[in-house]
Image (tube, helix red, strand yellow):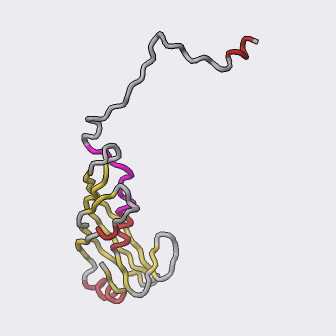
Amino acid sequence: MKWSTNELRKLVHIDNQFQYTADMKAFIDDKYIDLVDISLVAIKGNFQVVEDLDQYVFGVEVECTLTMLCAITLNEVEVPLHFTTDLVFGHKLVDDNLHEICGSTIDLDPYIFANILIEMPMKVVSEHAYDDYSEPIITLEDTEEKAKNPFEKLKKE
């Protein structure tokens, strides 16, 4: 969702709550190997305007479901996400937690998607991933010759 800074300065005194649903599928591309799909993202929260610092602080609650690939079977697994975060915007960069405002509008969606990527698990395993999983077990028979120690000659001399 996009807001102009002037609009935020007016709304902060009237109603600083917001709630909307965003479609973030456009942000998914080939570089996110394990991320297949994302549901509609439910976003709600509030904002404050810090006049002295010329900053806009958004307290955001995000809820969505990611479709990711299982690390073992490559089957699709649905992963529910629910988290809260604070996003701080300003015209002058103060530290790494501040996002710079380009122009006079603030678009939350790219920053919310970035936080979804941060909260996304590194890998997921489906519930039945190990049902058909097997590893070959190699056993040595007694008749096989045991491996010789390469340093055995040095001991004898």
Residue at (33% x, 48% y) in the render: 124
Please check the rendered image and state whether residue 120 is part of the magenta-colored stretch, yes or no.
yes
**Is 139 drawn above or below residue 28 in the view shown?**
above
Q: Where is residue 45 shown, x and y percent of the image?
A: 28, 71
Picture quarter with the N terminus:
bottom left
Magenta stretch, overall SS: loop
**83 up-or-down from 131: above or below:** below
Question: x, y (%) of residue 32?
Answer: 38, 60
| Nearer to me, 135 or 22 | 135
In this rendering, position of residue 54 left or right of residue 150: left
Task: Kindly identify the residue that appears in the image at 31 percent across and 70 percent down.
Answer: 26
Q: What span is in magenta? A: 116-126
Of residue 11 and residue 19, the one placed in the foreground of this image is: 19
Image coordinates for residue 148, horizontal then vertical, percent? 60, 17
Observer-nearest of 44 and 142 = 142
Q: Which corner quadrant of the image does residue 109 belong to? A: bottom left
**Residue 27 placement: quadrant:** bottom left
Q: Which residue is drawn at 28% across and 58% down?
A: 66
Residue beneath the point at 41% across and 74% down: 88
Residue found farthest to the right: 157
